Image (tube, helix red, strand yellow):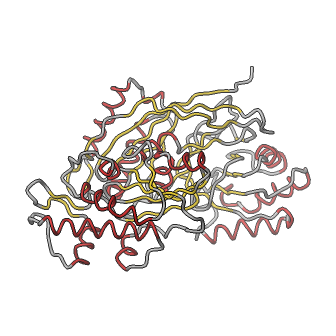
Amino acid sequence: MEINEIEILSVGVDVGSSTSHLVFSNLVLIRDQRSVTRRFNIAERNIIYEGRIIHTPLLDDDTIDIFRLTDFFKEEYKRAGIDPADIQTGAVIVTGESARKQNARQIAKALSNDAGKFVAATAGPNFESLIAAMGSGAALRSKHDGKTILSCDVGGGTSNLAITRNGETLSTSCVSVGGRLLGVDGKGKIWRMDPPAAMVMSDLGLKHQIGDRISKTDIDRIAGRFADILFEIITGPATSSLARALMLTADLNFTNRIDAVSFSGGVAELMYGGLNSFDDIGHILADKINLMTSALGVPVIELPNKIRATVIGAGAYSLSISGCSGFRDDKITFPIRNVPVMRVDVDQDKLSAEHVISQIKASFRRFDMEEGDETMALYFKDPVRVSYPQLELFAKSIESALPNTIAHKLPVILIFETDIACSVGNVIRRETEVKTNLLSLDELKLKEGDWIDIGEPLVGGQVFPVTVKSLVFHGE
């Protein structure tokens, strides 16, 4: 009997500058009966547990307390009544200033290893912006309204921006503006000062240090300058030297007219009446942002998810599903983690062995990589027509272009946007010496610079769960 619907239990874990928390989601995959390949799509994303929110525990200014953090998340699994062995997908994301901590990568890896079968470890400002737009509801709102929405997730250490239209994210950006960059206790004593706050103070001519008492006037000026920088990015492109210095990515692409702006993140909770208990400048920054929104010239819309936007995005929106016509060697073990995606620009109208081989070599040069040094995923849009002579030519060209990969017994991973993976895989095995270590997937939309994790196949080996992510920790 053909399976037409499956459910997957997913987790999203966010270790942020101010707070850490998780959510559990139930993802429903339904076979698309109208699809030629009868592929599965994610039809529903239902949040089944929203965990407690804690201050991200630190051992010192540069080190996250991994033991307290791990214990907290273990307790959350118990409170939710969920066994990590039942988790099939999800993402652990280290965001904002937490990604700068010296043990950030170890934290992400440790938590993802304990979180379930196929849970990605990730960090990176553009990826954060993407999933915050999804998790906040901005992407869905843009789809329902047919509008272009600029979403801004203001957290403890960074503000993640994205432009979405009709449900699709068109552009992302990130700047070091957040409520936790300057910590001030109830007596006006500075207990935390991250580098972006020091830069803003220097720009204002202030010379405060950790341990100093700071006046409300100076705090107000600092928060005001952060708000100015944020709105410079929102209305972009940024031009001031301070804004450029605080940006962690490129500017947003303002090709499309913005119809509305939304805010999420912990600071957005304060914008909409939440209480600040973090001994930082979050509430003052929220007030400054509220005062400036009227100058945007477009409506500011309130979305359902604010402080939980990133964690919901990590748990419910980080997964992609391959088409049903994949091909794999049974000896390949899963999950396959941290594979860079390399675009190969093969034009089927120019198809020849020389063309395919030269384009693969050009892609390795673009990455400053030597073929065979490490596992790469070669991504093709629509390189070959489905005719046996052309498939055979393409297959033999792949073999000729990857001699070191094959000799070193590294997986040959081929990904296609169109539904030709099974045909390509079968012809490669039949017509070349590549008999093992071959994985061919299709109906995935990727871009160069993505990193992917590939999980064990589902539905009797028909489809593969793929997490598209970033692996850039700010301190690297």
Identify the residue at image location x=61%, y=62%: 448
Give coordinates of residue 269: x percent, y percent. 33, 47
Identify the residue at image location x=41%, y=66%: 295
Identify the residue at image location x=63%, y=41%: 321
Asked if residue 43 is positioned above or below residue 266 in the image, the reply reads above
Asked if residue 26 is positioned above or below residue 363 in the image, the reply reads above
* Quadrant holding the C terminus: bottom left
Give coordinates of residue 464: x percent, y percent. 64, 39
Number of marks in the rendered image: 0
Give coordinates of residue 404: x percent, y percent. 66, 60
Compare residues 408 and 46 and report the one nearer the observer: 46
The answer to whether residue 400 of the structure is visible from this angle is yes
The answer to whether residue 102 of the structure is visible from this angle is no
Q: Tell me the quarter of the picture where residue 248 sits.
A: bottom left
Asked if residue 12 is positioned above or below residue 60 in the image, the reply reads above
Compare residues 235 and 14 and report the one nearer the observer: 235
Identify the residue at image location x=61%, y=37%: 42
**Horizontal placement of 81 versus 168: left or right?**
left
